[in-house]
Amino acid sequence: MRVATDVGGTFTDLVCVDDNGIRIAKSDTTPPNFEQGVMNVVELGGIDPSDVSDFVHGTTVVINALLSRRGAKTALITTQGFRDVLEIARGNRPDLFNFAFDKPAPFVPRYLRRELVERLDYLGRVVEPVNLDGLDAIVGDFKTDGVEAVAISFLHAYVNPVHELAVEARIKELWPEVSVIASHKVCGEWREYERTSTAVLSAYVHPLAKDYLASLDDKMSARGLSSKPLIMRSNGGVATVDGARNDPISMVESGPASGVLGAAALGRQIGAPNLIALDIGGTTAKTALIEDGSAKITTTYKIEWNRTNPGYPIKTPVVDLVEIGNGGGSIAWVDKGDRLHVGPQSAGSQPGPAAYGRGGDSVTTTDANLVLGRINPDLFLGGAQKPDWESVDRAFAKLEDKLGEKKEDIARGVIRIANANMINALKLVSLNRGYDPRDFALIAFGGGGAMHAVALAEELMTPKVIIPVNSSVFSAWGMLMCDLRRDFLKTDVKVLEASACAAIEEGYQSLEAHARETCLEEGMPEDALRLERLADMRYAGQEHTVKISLPSGAMTTSTLEGISKNFHAAHKREYTFELDAPIELVNFHTVVFADVDKKPLPVLPTTGRALEEAHKGRRKVDFDDCGVHDADIYDLALFEPGMALVGPAVLEDPTATVVVSPGKRVEMDAYGNLHIDMRAS
Amino acid sequence: MKPHHQDTFSQEIIKNALVAIGDEMFEAMARSSMSPIIYEVLDYSVGLTDRNGDLIAQGNGTTVFLGMIDALVKHIIEKFGANDDIHPGDVFISNDPYFGTHLSDVALAKPIFFNDALVGFAVNKAHWVDVGGMVPGSFTPSSTEIFQEGLQIPTMKVIDRGSTLQSVLELISVNIRMPKESIGDLWAGVAANNVGAERLTRLYEKYGVEAMDTAMTGLLDYGEKMIAAELKKLPNGVYEAEDWIDDDGHGDTPLRVCVRVEVSDDKFTVDFTGSAPQALGPINHGRTALVAAVRTIFKALTNPQIPANGGCFRAMEVICPEKTIFTAERPAPVSTYWETMLYAEDLIWKAMAEHLPDRLTAGHVLSVCAFILSAKHPETDEDVILVQPLVGGWGAMQHKDGLNGQFSVADGETYNIPVEIQEARYGVRVKQYALHNEDGGEGKHRGGKGVYLDYEVLCDEANFSGSFGRFKFPPWGAAGGAKGSSNYVELIRADAKGGEREIYGKPSQVKMRKGDVVRCVTATGGGWGNPFERSEEALKDDVQNGYVTPDQAARLYRRPRAAE
């Protein structure tokens, strides 16, 4: 039996796969003791941990600690003359015309940022050896000040970690119980601010993550789990507990990553290798592009970054996704120029949409979907509660006054604007990167995915929509489809030319040796290890790079030619032109996989039930551009493989609502996924 | 039923899509550029105008270009439209500084057609690392006429109906020092414009001409309406300020500049009459730059958040006589235009700060503190030119301390170049990048800290030039706060034998030798409120963190004990 638990902002989801098929369960998330919610959902799902072969776990504990500033008291040691790099940051001010700008405060106050005499040059040669004399006193001060974690970041440590290693070793001698993170271990790339920030934020979450993982491990093994849990990472793979503890920041975006990876895995199973994945939750929508069955991984992630805030960079490998403040709880509001906006503020679950009747006085996307008849009032909140229509009317009345429009028109406007926001995000991952959405299927999941997908696909011109089975807990299922994965990057600029072949091969081999060693130390199974080579490349002189997959086997002049060709093509796709300029390899990137025993989606049993038996009736549903129709309503729970119908229709159960526009044909495949053909109309 | 796509919500969606095009073009440009000044410093701007040259959307890396995009397009329409010489597939190029900034900023504009009719322009303007002239990097404090500052490219075509004019490219290439990078940047600009054109055309295909026209007009009206609502909230009245620019680089005489701001419910008028006449040195700029400066502060005072478009500035009027340093004419030198352009903003800022304490700070670093270090890479022996603006301190506000180490208001989404990249690419060694503790900026709320950035030269010989305004006249304090510290450059010679410090405000081609260190120092911003009123708690925190030395705490923040 394989089990995944996914701790989300509101709910902790469980998906269990065994020979009898798939079971799901949901319970409340229990901050700050998140592992309690996990134990609850395991119990609720009727799981006996001693039957579990793999227990995969995704957690928001890292991102929560960062966003709520509840991490450890952290100190930083830098090269002499550079302790303020963390505070100066990059000096940028995205909120260009706001002269009352607030610069993000550093996670380490200045008095806890200390310096040591040491210096390397950019080639990694020692200019001045590290002087450890002052370190004992610094550590003494840190102890006095109640420091719980220490980051070390020296200039050019990505080329040569010798000084960071010396300082790390000495601190561990002096103070074995403190968390220590050396920058080169969490980021092998150049740019001292970004690497320092990554080290600092890693240290900041380290004690908490360590305790959490230990507690989860203990509690599960006390309940009979014989294997070690596997921990979901942001790179779309899972980690051993040791691996996650050594590099806790790699868990920062684990939830979204598992949804994307699940989509890729499902796509491989059902022969849809090119997908645009869309996960619509309560507060945000996330989207990513999957090409040839795999998602892109980048190291350009930032927390709290937006149009007005420079945020904090974390150069850990994260699935390349775009997240926007548009979900079911997003609030509709009118600005001083009488324009209607949706999000990014969200009513969350408290007070929640107006229809919850918990004091929410703003119209949300969910309220608009209710008014338009898309959400069945009887299934509202899983059927647990009737919508509070009076509260909905009160919320709409405010917008009616401001806009001079009718309730239904405003509701339609809210949905259209929310959809337009999501379209912009979908374009960012596709059109903007040179991909034509017509070559992709849109796969939509999360609480709101199924409701909006068809309208979005129409606008985006994707020929097909896929709503996966159990779409509301799809991310948790995705975790069960992830292999063990750890990424290693190292900046080492090499011109891509025949004479560099040996050096490039050597670069990969040394990175691979280090990668292999680390992974084995962290408990990845030796016989299952599989290494892949990627490279961040650019035209000489450019800064921004394109990630290219490299063939396996030793580097030869002919493989180099192939790589150049791929780079030119990728550059042209992404940036619209290619140059007759030398190409540089900037970052060596090695990915270590260890395959786990995954189970594909099981075939759903069929009873031979007729389509009519799933038919629940009809209701008036607003399909926006396609008009208001009496739509056929079907019970999704009674839907079976092979069943098909043509919209206008709504397929619904307590967890999902699939809105099918007029003329669109929907069919359930053998596994329970719905395929909506957008070309038919 | 309203005509197709003329309903409120379709219109909103089109407007959002138009604004998104600016963002996309901006991204495309950064990603494909060859020069750090573009991809790291983001010293460029992109935009979209309607067919009349009115700004529809702009993507900015810096604030200085707010007003340049539309001015250029209007110039193109005037020069080429009259002869019916604007065609599909054309790309125009221009670095005419009197319609812009300085020669280093090169603009590219592409007319966009739908069904054979002109519907708009996609434009970008970016800082090229070198455009020729008397010094590498093309800006210098010592020029006296535009001809010394580089190649002048009048507004002309570089691509004519789809075919690239190789002769133009060749002419440009032989006149500039880094043709490989700059021509690469030209193609990056062309690509960014293509993205804008492609996206706009798609919108036309989807929504049709009528709905698009309504949306564009509506967007301009929306900008006007949003600003008008905020303008009404500004306190009516007349506000005045004066200040002094250090000198013009050709003498030691400070130059007086002044402003008179008149705010009414529906009009914002600024008058720079009385400011110094056009100068001999390159601190001048043209009227377009003056308008851009006023636009920036006007937006900050009214509504910093909404995307800028031409409608936002309808309530604004700029008065200034001809041939002042704010309204210079050909052939006046302009290569360090920003020093003066920023004064135009800062004067209004200074006049209004205490009247709008929730929007404005005390005086900040102001100068971009841009420098050029030309050297040889000691490992590769290549010629290198490091051009970079610097971060400095921002002024304190009524309720908070100033920002430490932040780019001038001229910049925005501008990034410093990482030390690790500077050392690898330029072969220099950075000795420190740190907040400094020079006196200045004391107040109930402290001015933000300026920085020390020290470069050691590792090759045999190098040259250093730069323009560090507010060398003699530090950032102003407000409401009783102290003025900040100065921007300056100090040369620390390897063979120094003590004696006088070697300090510059406008270093020009200063020779450096192996082992010499150039220390770039930026200002601490002005303080707000009486420093004696700074709370014990805040002061204790300052001292613990080393923002204020114990000596400064006693000397500058507490009343001296009466002499016995």
Image (tube, coloured by chain):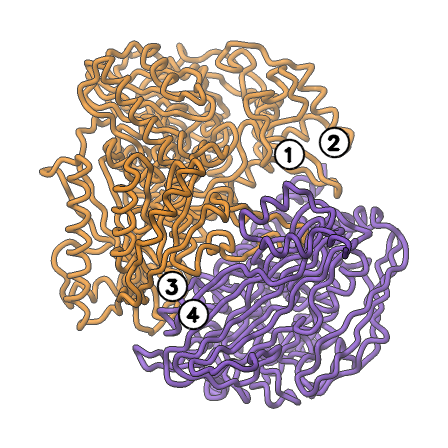
The answer to which of B490 and B282 lies nearer the viewer is B490
Identify residue for label 4.
B34
Q: Is residue B142 left or right of residue A265?
A: right
Q: Tell me the mark number nearer the camera, choosing from 3 and 2.
A: 3
Identify residue for label 2.
A405
Mark 1 neighbour class, 10 Å CA radius: few under 14, some 14 to 19, many 20 or more: many
Among the chains pictured, the one given orange colouring is A
Q: Tell me the mark number nearer the camera, choosing from 3 and 1.
A: 3
Which residue appears at 33% of the width and 37% of the height? A178
Q: Position of residue B129 (x, y in %)?
A: 50, 76
User: SS at mark 4?
Assistant: loop
Identify residue for label 3.
B420
Mark 4 neighbour class, 10 Å CA radius: few under 14, some 14 to 19, many 20 or more: many
Marks 1 and 2, the one that precedes in the sequence: 2
Q: Position of residue A428 (x, y in %)?
A: 47, 48
User: SS at mark 1?
Assistant: helix
The answer to which of A173 and B263 lies nearer the viewer is A173
Identify residue for label 1.
A413
Q: Position of residue B172 (x, y in %)?
A: 50, 85
Q: Is the same chain shared between marks 3 and 2?
A: no
Residues at discs 1 and 2 in contact (Cβ within 8 Å): yes
The picture's colour for chain B is: purple
**Dividing the picture into quarters, in which one does residue A45 lie?**
top left
